Image (cartoon, rainbow, N blue to C red):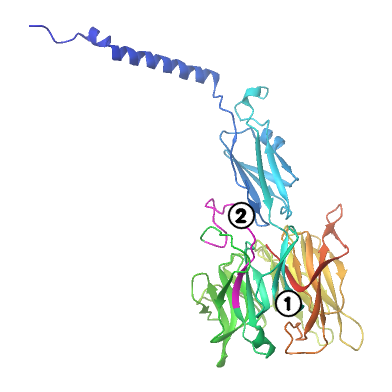
Amino acid sequence: MANLTATPKSRFFQPLDRTAIVLILILSLLIGGLLLKGDRTAAKVRSFSWQDRQVGAEDTAFILAFNRPMDHESVEQNLQINPPLPGKISWAGRRMAYTLTAPAPYGKSFELTLDTARDRFSQADDPRTQMQAFSGQFRTRDRAFVYLGVSGEEAGRLILANLTRQEQRILTPKNLVVMDFQPYPNGDRILFSATDRSSQTKGLLDQQLYTVTTGIEVQAPAANGFGLAPDSTQPIENRPAGEMTLVLDSKEYQNLKFDLSPDGQTIAIQRVKRNDPGDYGLWLLKTGAKPEKVNADPGGNFLITPDSQTLAMSQGQGMAILPLAKEAPTLDFLPKYGVVLNFAKDGSAAAMVKFNVDPTNPTRSLFLVTNQGVEKEILNTDGSILEAAFDPTKTNLYCLYTKRLPGDVYEEEPYIAAINLKTYQVTDLLQLPIQRDIQLSLAPDGVGILFDQVVTDGSKNPSGAIRSREGKAITNGQLWLLPLLQDDQGKVIPADPQPLQLAGLRPRWLP
């Protein structure tokens, strides 16, 4: 009988074993060679967070992600942005963040390039280790604003003016007279209150809340890495201009003053019941929910804070800070102030007005109030303080205020002023014609201020389609742009206002 048991030596020299041993030797040699020579994979940019996106003033930083650890100095020296955008660089592993020191100017296209940089472990004089050249593109939002028409078919209607594209478009229908409006954070929609034109001419208060699309294409950078809009739980869907949606009717309650939260998720509105004037107070309307009444004193002037979580409201002899909730206690009370005009975008400061009670010389003071407990008087006037706006870098506060003219007839002369928030120096930029119905709007990138100049018929005409703060019928209006220029030391200096070839009033920049 044959011996079927193979010897160890014969098993070792089986063809399959020999093949495996040869492959192991070859792979070992290759691995050894790679270890000796190093990884020759070229460094490159894996992603650019602003690639082919449209950025706004709230977009303060972009990220470049690399496939390898990079030599920081070589990247920083070779990174180019055209046109230039000043900023600061920081690193976290293979990711580089570039934070702008000021918002990118609107209505422009930019190119970012990076070449001849190298990774951390390569030789500076070895051309084979230089990274792959990278080029990326992005642009800023169109320079656009919305205003109210004042004449002919445009009277009382919302109009979009796109300065970048040199286009104008009426957004609201003929049958509605718009009373007030606020853009949503992305500029794709406008929240507005309006009355039916037939009811308005009869002197009836019948405001309803609507939204209307602007037709602005939104291609914002991803929020939190998920490609979601800041004011929505769904990706932004670009829609044509003029699509209207009823937000809140006026069947049971009359709708008065309203404010839209910075994140676009909450509307605060004062309402009064039609058959019970004593039922008056603040309501909250959150996205996807029914309106709810807030259990708080009705109050007066109010403004939602930048974090969209609280609200500042004048109550009695001070300013109350309330949470945006149906039943919640007051968070804080500031007894010195009667009006809050505006907040810095990051919520670190507010501009508030104090009424100085003096029978012989009543004045008003503008205060800078910070979240660090600082309360600094920055302006005092014997007239009125009407509006204020922080510039994007929080370097200056722009305000609209008046001075009382001497004489027996009470008249107030309005001014647009810049207040430096480091030196507290007040610079009057422009003296305006004597009138109270002036509104200003600071551009989101801080390059200019829109304001209006209206003409009234001199009488309180209740049938006028559009009325001033005093109730006088407005017959015409002119829109102006005041450029904000700075000298070599960064001080804002007066400039000549530019008339826009637009008849309207109450202009407001889109974010």
Is residue 419 at all visible to an observer of this figure? yes
Residue 353: where, in percent of width, then height? 74, 75
> Which residue bears the numbered disc 2?
220
The amino acid pointed to by label 1 is Glu
Q: Height in image: 99 above or below 428?
A: above
Most prominent secondary structure in the magenta stretch?
loop
Is residue 304 at all visible to an observer of this figure? no
Residue 262: where, in percent of width, then height? 62, 66
Q: Quadrant of the N terminus?
A: top left
Quadrant of residue 128 in the image? top right
Q: CA distance from mark 1 to mark 2?
A: 34 Å
> Which residue bears the numbered disc 1?
153
Residue at 59% x, 31% y is 43
The amino acid pointed to by label 2 is Ala
- Residue 231 painted magenta: yes
- Tell me the magenta residue range: 209-232
